[in-house]
Image (cartoon, rainbow, N blue to C red):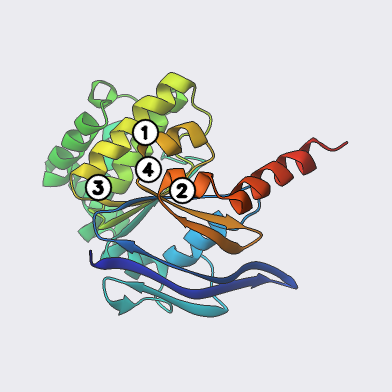
Amino acid sequence: MTALLEIQDVGVQFGGVRALTNVGFSVATGEFLSLIGPNGAGKTTLVRGITGVIRLQQGRIVFAGRDISAWPVHRRIRAGLAMTHQIVRPFHSMTVLDNVALPAGHENIGNVVKALLRLNRSPARKKALELLSLVEIVDVAHQSVRGLPLGVVKRLELARALALEPQLLLLDEPLAGLNSQEAARLADMITGINRQGVTIMMIEHNLGEVLRVSRRLVVLDNGRKIADGDPDTVMADPVVRSAYVGKEKQDAAP
């Protein structure tokens, strides 16, 4: 399969702390890969490096055959990258529908005021309704975001990212804070989106759901890649098991 994303020898340092060291792997077009590891392993740092939120001190990010390492965030988004965040921050002054219609009309985002004025008569509104139906929250389309349950807001975040028509969807702990039923439902939804052709890389701590839906795992620990492969093989790796067990013991220490 053709590599859509190539992470080549990536290194990130904050002051004297090495957050990522010589991390490298690729994500094939159409793949569903989960990026896992103990807290502080460098997962979110890596994803922020991919999106351009933080600057790499070493290595390259190649997306769809182009070196995007020096590109600003907005250019990477227009090239086909989209990301959801663990802490969801929708526009609380807008309806659920308008929260999705705004990125759905992303060709107008250069002028936000103009984009907002066009929403009511724009094809973006129709597209937003389709996406809300896809994530099964179209029934709250005309409600304010304020006060909605977390499970609904998480699905709204997913719809907003899909509105950008990404080639690669980066998900940062989409299941965090959800109960087991909600987590399973959202994980199935993400799997369905992948089957429709969207390449997905997901950071997630819910290992039960990760192992149920992922085709491939990449594991980070202390900023380094320690494993890469199918879920059964990776989770049987003594190095991976040691990383998780060691971290759990450290966290449990008084």
Q: Is residue 50 above or below residue 34?
A: below
Nearer the camera: disc 2 or disc 4: 2
Q: CA distance from mark 1 to mark 2?
A: 21 Å
Q: Is residue 219 left or right of residue 133?
A: right
Between 116 and 90, the one lying in front of the other is 90
Nearer the camera: disc 1 or disc 2: 2
Which residue is denoted by mark 4 in the rendering?
Answer: 214
Which residue is denoted by mark 3 in the rendering?
Answer: 163
| Labels 1 & 3 near each other (Cβ < 8 A) | no
Which residue is denoted by mark 2 in the rendering?
Answer: 233
Q: Earlier in the sequence, mark 2 or mark 4?
A: 4
Q: Is residue 180 above or below residue 126?
A: above
Q: Is residue 6 left or right of residue 89?
A: left
Q: What amino acid type should be assigned to the residue bearing mark 4?
A: Ser
Q: CA distance from mark 2 to mark 4?
A: 13 Å
Q: Which mark is residue 187?
A: 1
The percent coordinates of residue 87 (x first, y second) are: 52, 41
The percent coordinates of residue 103 (x first, y second) are: 28, 50
Which secondary structure lies at badge 3?
A: loop
Between 125 and 4, the one lying in front of the other is 4
Q: What amino acid type should be assigned to the residue bearing mark 2?
A: Thr
